[in-house]
Amino acid sequence: MNNDSALQVTDLNAFYDQSHVLHGINFEITKGEVVTFLGRNGAGKTTTLRALMGLVKGTGSVRHAGTEILSIRTHRIARRGIGYIPEERGIFASLSVAENYKLPPRLADGGMSDTEISELFPNLAERWKSPGTALSGGEQQMLAIARVVRTGARLLLMDEITEGLAPVIVEQIRKAVVLLKSRGFTILLVEQNIEFARSVADRHYIIEHGEVIDQLDHTMANSDAGLRKIHTYLGI
């Protein structure tokens, strides 16, 4: 195994009741990389993130920084510095922006300070006392990312973070992802916005029917041939 490996997944299988969703997923992420999962709806991308966090029971092997984590509980995975930003964001209507932000405890060393996070997402500082659901969709997404970064997570699992957002907000999120990468964060991103994915990722894994069927590096993905290949896989 590469000593710089942040995450190494081997033969990952997962089930929802009797439905076999993941069929032997294999991939690896190096520390400091941004890697995306691309694939059609239902391909198993979100299920993979949930299995990595222990939210879906899986079989196979998931090694974080060389340590097997597939069999440990979700709270212990989080304490290793792995953070999950789900598609639904999970912003609580009864709590203010500040209360939503501070809700998860600090779990690991190495997170960004409150000052650094306010510089990353200045919109939040302006809405600190507002109810969480008074925020726009883009601001809610910023809040969801900010509170996970605050916990000390250095490996971020992000699910559809640009879904339904206006282009100007997508650009703000893109700049935030680029900045997090420059600070040494490792990011695994499930994304349907192909242009966003191509602009931030070092590598792309194509997921189909619960398996990794191809891998494209940044150069290939940003070539005409690579884009045609992605469009073919995704049926665009």
Image: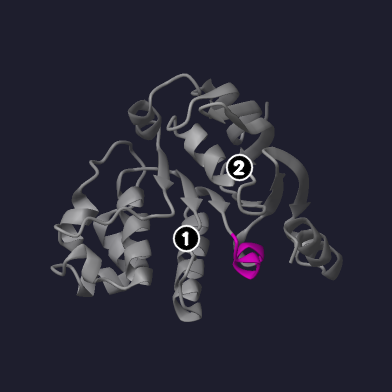
Q: How many marks?
A: 2
Residue 79 painted magenta: no
The three-letter code of the residue at mark 2 reads Gly
- Residue drawn at x 78%, y 46% is 214
Residue 195 painted magenta: yes
- Residue drawn at x 42%, y 33% is 55
Q: Secondary structure at mark 1?
A: loop
104, 47: nearer the viewer = 47
Work out whether 102 lies above or below 25.
below
How many other residues sit within 10 Å of disc 2, few (<14), some (14-19) or many (≥20)? many
The three-letter code of the residue at mark 1 reads Ile
Q: Secondary structure at mark 2?
A: loop
Residue marked by disc 1: 161
Q: Disc number at residue 190?
A: none
Q: Is residue 203 left or right of residue 72?
A: right
Q: Quadrant of the N terminus?
A: top right
Residue 126 is situated, as x and y percent measured from the top left of the image, at 21, 75
